[in-house]
Image (tube, rainbow, N blue to C red):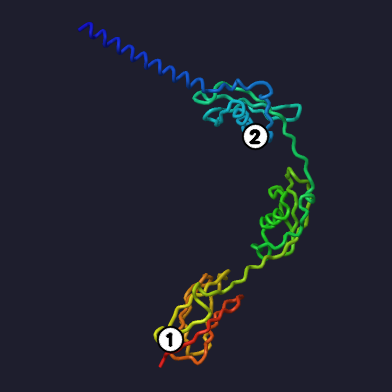
Amino acid sequence: MKKLLGILAATGLVATTGATVVSCGDKKADESSVKALGDIKGTDLTLAPSANDEAAAKTAAIAKIKSKLSVTVVEKTDVTFSDFKAAESAEKAGSIKVTAVESSKLVSGNVTFTLTFKAAEAKVDLSTVITEKALGAIDFKGEGIPLSDDILTAAVAKNNKLDKTQVEVDGITAEGANIKAKSDSTKYNVGTVAVTFTKQEAAKPTLSFNEGQESTLELTKSVSSKTITVKVANPASDQKITVKSGSADIVLGEVTGNDGAASYTFTVTASKNTTQGVVVTISYKNAEDLTLTVTASGFD
């Protein structure tokens, strides 16, 4: 019995030791995949951010870490930033410290980067950017005039280098306005450019029959009535179609559909033969009339 227990104990010890060895092996493998921030050295410690603020410095630091260590770190998950000091001039550089979060599976340690100064771009005169001053037709969404944003949108369409966040509009009339650089513009010198435009006319409504309906209609005693559908393109919100028969022998039903609708229906009914085609006229304000020629036959 003692001999058996000894064998079992030895077997368990071997199994436990094996498990322990595997566990340590995994841990070492994990540790070997973590990159040391301190491995970034020399000229790679100098960053050239797109601006002199902390956000730009963080972006540049993350990009440098990705470039040199082939890992994409995330703030708070992998790294924290501290000791930010903005660059003040070409002679007075800034700095920012990056420290690995203890639980990060990507990086360890810390590194301090030097930040070069980003000089402001030279301002230009607005007149050199807005060279096309006739802006064309603009939708007048204001009370008889266009809105500022619509003017700027039209100005950018004609002058694609214009940054509309750097300018503002005043002196708006039905024919033109002034576009001027904002007082705090970082791109444009103080100045004003006068632009012109015209009112964009609303598209006129047009009438058409529903698909399958021709401009002629033949009614008979067996089929003495038919429903007609008329479509309206570019409808006006306060308008609907009107219908008129050229003869009392062709009776028109009430038009169904609300003001501003895109389609309407009405019935056409015959009760006796017509010696010639009767013209039904469909009208809509500012649209060309639509006509339907109706004939009736087979009635006693």
Helix, strand or loop at label 2? It is helix
Which of 282/239 is in front?
282
Q: Residues within 10 Å of mark 2 (few under 14, many from 20)?
A: few
- Give how far across and how far down residue 108 sits, in percent: 54, 22
Q: Residue at x 53, y 81 (%)?
A: 292
- Give how far across and how far down residue 91 sits, in percent: 76, 27
The answer to which image quadrant residue 36 occupies is top right
Q: Which mark is residue 56?
A: 2
Q: Which residue of the protein is positioned furthest toward the top in this rendering?
A: 2
Which of 215/113 is in front?
215
Horizontal side of 212 relative to 181 (left or right) equals left
Helix, strand or loop at label 1? It is strand
Q: Which mark is residue 159?
A: none
Q: Which quarter shows the N terminus?
A: top left
Residue type beneath disc 1: Thr
Horizontal side of 261 relative to 12 (left or right) equals right
Q: Which residue is mark 1?
A: 220
